[in-house]
Image: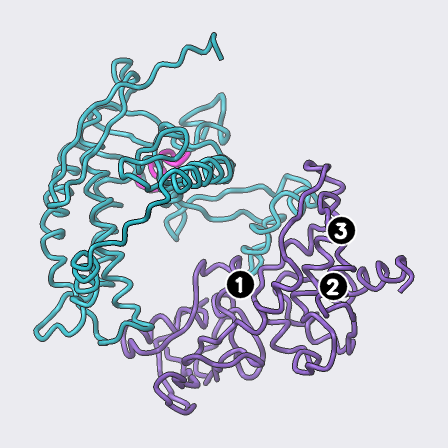
Chain colours: A cyan, B purple
Amino acid sequence: MSRYNPQRMELAGRDEVARAIYNEVLSGRGTANGGVYLDISHVDATVIEDRLPDMLEQFLNVGVDIRKTPMEVYPSMHHLCGGVKIDEWGKTSVLGLYAAGEVTGGIHGGNRLGGNAIAECQVFGRRSALSAIDFAKNNSKLVPPDERDLNDELERIAGFLYKQNDFLPPEEFGDQLRDVMWNKVGIARTKEGMAEARAELNRMAKETVSLGTRLQTLRYNTDLVNCLEDLNMIMVARAIVEAALLRQDSRGAHYRMDYPEPNPEWSKFNTQVILGADGSISSSKIPVVELDMSTN
Amino acid sequence: MKTKIKILRSDKTNEVNPYFEEYEVPYSDGMTVLDALRYIQVEFDPSLSFRWECSKGTCGTCGMMLDGKPIMSCHKHLEPNETASITPLTRFPVDKDLVVDLSPSLDKLKLAKPYLVPGDQTIQSKAQADASRLLRSCMECWLCVSVCPMVEDNRLNIADPVGMVNLARYYLDVRDNLDRPELAQEAGIGSYICDKCQLCVNVCPKGINIPKDAIQILLEADHKNGS
């Protein structure tokens, strides 16, 4: 890290450290397995046992004692910043639907502080629950869902079964999707790479009608679960690319090689994506809500 | 290199009686039972059913038997050129293949009220929290239940090992406002009989010594109450 942030070293922001690791490996200075070494053996063993018991156990299970030897690490997809738009009480843009946790956006900004994922779940989990209770109390007249909507949904799910002709295996589709996102909308983004990703994702979104299952059951059908997840993943992936293309600066985990610095103009805006029921997708800048902290 | 794995298949709903099916999978250094199961499901047989989630030993979902011993499939490494025999977790009714019905244990666990019932003290110091720390690492993987000889005797008024861990865990939590020994008595799980066979001690992936860390605590609590 002395090459990247000599003052803060390994305690630089997560995004910086991730990019540094990525860059070191890309520049040919990585380990044989394509990672870098993380060494905490200088820390007292009892501190490691007390503060990092799960990590200690995980590495011991593969024969690495982190109290004595370094670990090999490489960045991965750990947490998704950004997601469903909510207000401070978990209310979404769909009436009666509340959301909390990693699925939502707007809590962490460009970089999530370690430990705040749990805090987020607890705080917004509770808030959204209270909201939902309130909604239920004040909307006691329940209307059953339309039979046609129900049947449409059941047909949509069952539609993956009984594909007569050649169908797309959902596991492969998911792997392809992951490759596109990691390679082109990953740690270091470019306009060209993301534009390619957008085109590929649009193509893959149309291909989802060809997804199918090897088993024709609704029970214990992993292929079916993967099909449904593929649909959801494509939707999220397309939203991510739209937002990343729109935002022409770098900020925290969103790093663009064509706009490598944070732009003060962009600090006043968030990016918002609207997914249409017809599969259309549009994005816009929305102003950050300015809080008057003096009155709080 | 290859390795063989034979799996006990069955399907309760479709009335398919248990039978062994053998597969040969490519072997790579460090591969786990879970790696093999997933390979089989993707490459050979989509009808093979098994549970898994985190794939790194922290969630307790993937318990099953390897050569008659309970393991977490994500943590157990396979050897090359051997035949591993994989069967569902014992002492649980089998739903399909390696998926067992956990409801007998879950229903029993509910009796222990496995959640905090808060009182006036809502914050605890680290020293206070450390009292229940090891018990809190229980991930309900059910490996202890699968080996416990006491579990099948319904005449005994006992919680199964996971229930004992939970009772002790909340008993030791200063924030908990429920009289746990009393709750256990009322719920019919107030006897802390243990065969002292140490089978659970050998299998707990988190290193919890249930007789020493949980049952002993509960017996002492009972003793305090003068029962």
Above or below, B163 against A146 in this view is: below
Q: Chain of mark 3?
A: B
Residue found at the very far front of the displayed protein: A141
Region in magenta: A17-26
Secondary structure type for disc 1: loop
Q: Which mark is residue B184?
A: 2
- The 10 Å Cα crowd at callout 2, few under 14, some 14 to 19, many 20 or more, is many
Location of residue A228 (image quadrant): bottom left
Same subunit, tags 2 and 1? yes
Q: Earlier in the sequence, mark 3 or mark 1?
A: 1
Q: What residue is shown with label 3? A: B172
Image-based side of B34 in relation to A83, left or right: right
For the point 44% across and 46% down, the residue is A73
- The 10 Å Cα crowd at callout 3, few under 14, some 14 to 19, many 20 or more, is many
Q: Chain of mark 1?
A: B
* Residue A201 image position (x, y, % from top left): 14, 47
- The 10 Å Cα crowd at callout 1, few under 14, some 14 to 19, many 20 or more, is many
